Image (cartoon, grey):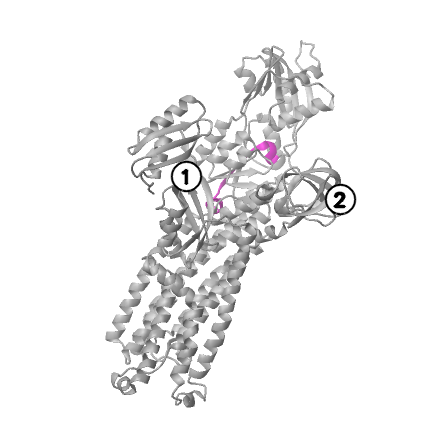
Amino acid sequence: MENQSNKQVSIPINGMTCAACVSHVEAALSSIDGIVESSVNLATNRALIRMDTDISTSLIQETVSNAGYQVGTENRMIRIEGMTCSACVSHVEAALNTVSGITHSSVNLATGNASVEFVPGLLNIDDLQNSVAQSGYKANTTNLDLRENYTDRTDHTKHLQSRLIFSIIGSFLIFTVSFELFPWVTYLKTIPAYKLSIWAIATPIQFWTGWMFYSSGIKALKHGSPNMHTLVALGTSVAYGYSSFIVALSFVSPQLLLLSGLNDDLFFGTAAIIITLVIFGRYLESRSLNRTSEAISQLIRMQPTTANIETDGQETRVSIDLLKIDDLIIIKPGDGIPADGEIVEGHSSVDESMISGESLPVDKSKGDPVYAASLNHNGYFKFRATEVGSNTVLSNIIRLVEEAQASKAPIQRIADKVAAYFVPAVGIVALIAFLSWMVLGPDPQITVATLVLVSVLIIACPCALGLATPTAIIVGIGKAAQNGILIHSAEALETLHKIDYLVLDKTGTITEGKPSLTDIIPAPDHDYDSNYILSMAASAEKYSEHPLAQSVLQAAANRGIIIDQADSFESFQGLGVKAYIDAKTICVGNAAMMASENINIKHMHTNEQNLGSSGKTPIYVSENATCLGLIGIADTARPSSSHAVAALANMGLEIEIATGDTSETAQCIANEVGIPAVRSGLLPSDKVQAIKDLQSQGRIVAMVGDGVNDAAALAQADVGIAMGSGSDISVAASDITLIRNDLTSVGKSLELSHSTIRIIKQNLFWAFFYNILLIPVAAGLLYPIFNLYGSVPTYMYFLIGDSGFLNPIVAACAMAISSVTVVTNSLRLRATR
């Protein structure tokens, strides 16, 4: 991946915090041979680089990384046109990875898309398009609308359908006038223009219906990257070319044809029927692939195209493309919601199943959020738009799912590597078989050798191999999205089925995450008022995002307590908070927090244990290093947690709780939901270490959490699963997001992963088995067998003739069936509950 020389570029730099960082990055960049000048801007987080020679992108990344920073990257989906098989995937990826600025690419045959990670400033779009074009394909880098994306797929299916109809009619005509079993064929062969008539019918099928094979296949061959279309084009061209030669020779010099000893049989019908069968297979495959993406296309179709907005008291209908943030939108009974927003007037019940997977409608009233593409039932309300267009929750879900579907599972990389060498290997096998039967074959040798060549080229198309994994991934990830489970990558989906150990956070994961204050216990020997203790705690917790902090603030609001403004605020993950209020140091947190601040709490231990044994979380409050008292906060387990834990245990998983809460509180919740193992009093770093310890024992670990303090553990786990109600940081660090905030979704995601991997293995088995079994048959393996042990049974004549050589038409039919079988097998995942 090389940069153009004599070039000035601006690249993003992540991780800088001060002027010293600027110096470090500039020094690192200047140390690279070829960079003559570098200037780093802290305000924009970008580096301006001037180079006088070619420098690899990886070298720039590595140098900046070694200095303690990162070169920023972006991801982009681009459309790749002309791919036909898994060999194409390898060719396109190889072409993309040679482009300056691209750090990683993943191409998906089933979607026809490539996911490209690149360094802004280093990537030249023209270079990308030229590199892909030189490999025999076309890159469409325009940002297509999601609706256009799926419309294009439908149009492609219709295009195949029109060519298929023409090809079927033409092939049927050739078949009816050339198949010897029809009584009129003998008479037709006596007509002088007979051969020319068949040639006239076959030619448009070969070069109009089959033009897609030439435009893609021959171009790919010229660039040294043969694909499935190359094999079809070569195979049918051999049959068509041989037959055209016979027709020409019979008209120019019938005597010469007779003397040459060539069989005057024509293979126009063979070529035409092969093209028809391959087009038919591609048509069925295209229809099936459209269905694999149905989960996402349904979401797209749910979005309304217009909206009613209120401006100066007047209602106006506008396109959703014209919506802006803060627009006041009117929703009537039965309307689809066109944007994300907050209700300002009215109430209703809203179907949000396309977002959460939850079938029951949700009651909405003033102040509640609503989401684009959800469906209003029978109420009337107005809401203020907060996000529109591509920034809505639904658009982000669609984007995330499409990126995940375009990603590549580790198991798929094996198939792609095999396919990259498969097509050239098949070409060599076909050529060897052709030459062998030219020398060793029965009379007429040229005819037999030609049939073998065509059969091998046609039957060995690796289309099924290329579709085996991505079709299952697309359906699996789409099905997960329908159930409120967002799987961020194909690798996460594959790894999930290997999980044997599950670590669960407590608050907000097993429990509701909506704790409420239940107790305020003043310290003995001090006359502290409970309202004063609550006031200090609430004032200190004002800027905290922890669920326990919110319960303290809510309790203060319920009592009408005035919350003071803190002069400063510090948060200590896994411990608590410290604030300075009116020249007083207020600490709110657990026992470890008090110990770190050298605050004596021995006189409160009994109270702490009593709260913990009741399933309540004890929180200490101190003022100027003196313990004011203890607050008890209760967070009940979700109603579904016990059932979900039992189901996960029945899957063979070992389960434990890892929490920063006290051992008494954690054990109480564990007993309630049926979890035998508990780790309590953990800091975020302790959770990470606990997962590392399990991994060192050979365990494959999944972690489920929702808070900022879970982010590091989620990233460390083999699969990190975040509750959708959790912090943005925990969601970003995770591999899977559960929109429904329900542990039963963990079980569903595991079941879906197992089903998807099972389908992938079935697909790969049949794809490999099909090629391993039928390529030798197409190459003529059965001829010596039948020649040695007797003749071919009459009922097998259509399949392998009277000598044991595979009929090219049967080869084309088998190839088409293999691809359709793989896609259809993947579609079975849609029935997964």
Residues in magenta? 491-510
**Please, is residue 150 above or below residue 19 in the view?**
below
Residue 244 on image: x %, y %: 34, 77
Residue 613 in sight in this render: no
Instruction: Determine whether, in the image, residue 649 is placed left or right of residue 422.
Output: right
- Quadrant assignment for the N terminus: top left
Question: 303 or 768: which is nearer to us?
Answer: 303
Q: Which residue position holds label 1?
A: 119
Which residue type does callout 2 highlight? Tyr
Residue 514 in sight in this render: yes
Asked if disc 1 and disc 2 are in contact, CB closer than 8 Å, the reply is no
**Please, is residue 427 above or below residue 409 in the view?**
below
Q: Is 806 inside the magenta-drawn segment?
A: no
Element carrying mark 1:
loop
Q: Which residue position holds label 2?
A: 380
Residue appearing at x 28%, y 82% in the figure: 262
Q: Earlier in the sequence, mark 1 or mark 2?
A: 1
Residue appearing at x 41%, y 54% in the figure: 138
Residue 647 on image: x %, y %: 58, 44
Using a 10 Å C-alpha cutoff, classify the residue at mark 2 as few (fewer than 14 neighbours), some (14 to 19) or many (20 or more). some
**In the orientation shown, which residue stands out farthest toward the left?**
439
Q: What whole-number distance in Å separates the C-alpha atoms at marks 1 and 2?
A: 47 Å
Residue 611 on image: x %, y %: 65, 23
Residue appearing at x 37%, y 31% in the figure: 64
**Please, is residue 469 above or below residue 31 in the view?**
below
Residue 570 on image: x %, y %: 55, 20
Which residue type does callout 1 highlight? Val
Instruction: Determine whether, in the image, residue 596 is placed left or right of residue 771.
Output: right
Quarter holding residue 528: top right
Q: Is 509 inside the magenta-drawn segment?
A: yes
